Image: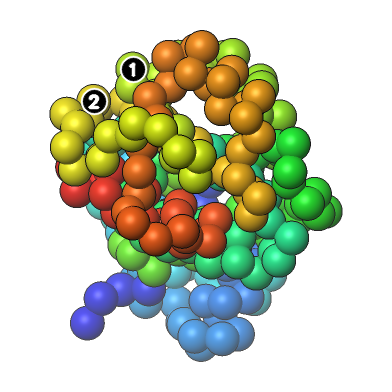
Amino acid sequence: MALPFFYQPEIATTSSVILSEETSKHCVQVLRMKEGEHMQLTDGKGNAYTAAITKSDKKHCTVAIESTSFLPAATKQISIGISLLKNANRFEWFLEKATEMGVTNIIPLLCNRTERQHFRFDRMHSIVIAAMLQSQQVWLPILHEPTNLSNVIELSNAQQKLIAHCEAGDKATICGLDIANDVQILIGPEGDFSIAEIEMALQHNYQPVSLGNTRLRTETAGVVAAALLVNA
C-alpha cells in the first residue's frame, strides 16, 4: 500500500522537519497517524523524501527524514496562458486537470473580453498542490498571478509559441507540428481573443493552431491543449 503523500515546501534533510499545521492536522487528526509511522514528502522541486513520525502532534507534527531521491524535471516544459473565467469552478477544474497531466507553467490571463473575477491565489494554489499529490508527482507547476495578455505576449521567451483562437484563417493542428521542448500556448476567454489581440500575438511570432472542429469552452480548450502538447 502506498504511503501517505504530502507537500512540504521547505525541507532540511539534515534535521527533523516540523510539518505545516495543515499537514500536521491531516496526518494526526484525519489519518490518525502515530509515532513511527511512515509517509512520503515532496518539496515540489523534484525531491522526494521518506520520513517517519517522531512526534505526533496535530499542530506541529515532527518527522525524521530517512531517505531521499530526486526526479529530474520533464524534458518538455509546457506553459499554458488561459483566460480567467466568470465561473471560478471551471477554472479550478482546468487547474486540476492540467496539473495531473504534467503542465509545468500556468498563467491566468486578463484579456479584453475576460469577465474578471476575484482571483483567490491561495485557493487556486492549493488546488494545484492537491492535484500534484493526487497524481504522485514531485514537481509543482508554477502558478502565476493574473497577468495582462499583452505582457505575456511581449515578454514570452518560449522556444515555440502557439495561440488557439476561433477566427477564420489558416491554422496548424498541434498533432501536425514538431513540438519544441519549451512551448507556450494561449487560450482565450468565452468571447475569444479580440482581433487586435490575435494580431499582436502574430506579430510576436505566435503560430495559430486549431484544437479541433468544434468550438470548445475555455477550460475544455485548455485541457485539450494540455493533452495534445504533453503527448506530442
* Amino acid type at mark 2: Ala
Residue drawn 71% across the image and 66% down it:
87
> Visible in this render: residue 122?
no
- The circle drawn on residue 3 is none
Q: Position of residue 190 (x, y in %)?
A: 64, 54
Q: Is residue 59 above or below residue 29?
A: above
Position in image of residue 54 (x %, y %): 47, 67
Q: Is 190 drawn above or below residue 181 in the view shown?
A: below
> In screen coordinates, is 75 left or right of 205?
left
Q: Secondary structure at mark 2?
A: loop
Mark 2 surroundings: few (<14), some (14-19) or many (≥20) residues within 10 A: some
Residue drawn at x 60%, y 66% as measured from the top left: 90
Is 9 in front, or is 164?
A: 164
Q: Does any portion of residue 214 appear in the rendered image? A: yes
Residue 180 bears which disc, if any?
Answer: 2
In depth, the one of 70 and 181 nearer the eye is 181
Mark 1 Cα shell of 10 Å, populated few (<14), some (14-19), many (≥20): few
Relative image position of residue 180 (x, y in whole percent)? 23, 25
Look at the image and tell me in which quarter the C terminus lies. top left
Is residue 140 shown left or right of residue 124?
A: left
- Residue at image point 68% right, 56% down: 85
Does 225 appear above or below 95? Answer: above
- Amino acid carrying label 1: it is Gln
Looking at the image, do the residues carrying marks 1 and 2 touch, with CB atoms under 8 Å apart?
yes
The disc, 1 or 2, on the residue closer to the chain's N-terminal end is 1
Q: Is residue 207 left or right of residue 86?
A: left
Q: Quadrant of the N terminus?
A: bottom left
- Position of residue 213 measured from the top left corner of the image (x, y, whole percent): 33, 56
Q: Which mark is residue 159?
A: 1
Of residue 153 and residue 101, the one placed in the foreground of this image is 153
